[in-house]
Amino acid sequence: MTHKDVVEFIEPFRMLMLATIGANGRAYASTAPFVRKEDCFYVFVSTVAQHGRNLLQAEHASILFAAD
């Protein structure tokens, strides 16, 4: 898959699956809104959400785009 193919695949998405790790070491995954500018993803989370709290403790995360 080329960079162009990836960009075209991602283009229609407005939500992504975000996976983070909690303080207890367990994975936590759910959907989150995002915008993409150039090759950067800006994911909107709050510290009210589990993802936000997880990211304050461990900056690592994974994202997934799944087509129907």
Image (cartoon, rainbow, N blue to C red):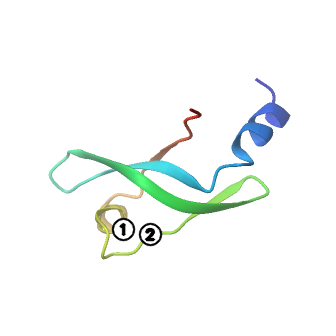
Q: Are marks 2 and 1 in contact (CB under 8 Å)?
A: yes
Q: Position of residue 52 (x, y in %)?
A: 36, 68
Q: Mark 2 or mark 1: which comes first in sequence? A: 2
Query: Which image quadrant for residue 51?
Result: bottom left
Give the side of residue 35 with respect to residue 66, left or right. Answer: right
Q: Which residue is mark 2?
A: 45
Which residue reaches farthest top? 1
Whether residue 3 is situated above or below residue 50 in the rendered picture: above
Q: Which residue is mark 1?
A: 52
Instruction: Residue at 74% x, 35% y: name it.
Output: 6
**Which amino acid does the dot numbered 1 rest on?**
Gly
Task: Name the one closer to the observer, 4 or 39.
Answer: 4
Q: Position of residue 42 (x, y in %)?
A: 61, 64
Instruction: Residue at 37% x, 51% y: name it.
Output: 30
Instruction: Residue at 44% x, 53% y: name it.
Output: 31
C-alpha separation, residue under disc 2 versus residue under disc 1: 6 Å
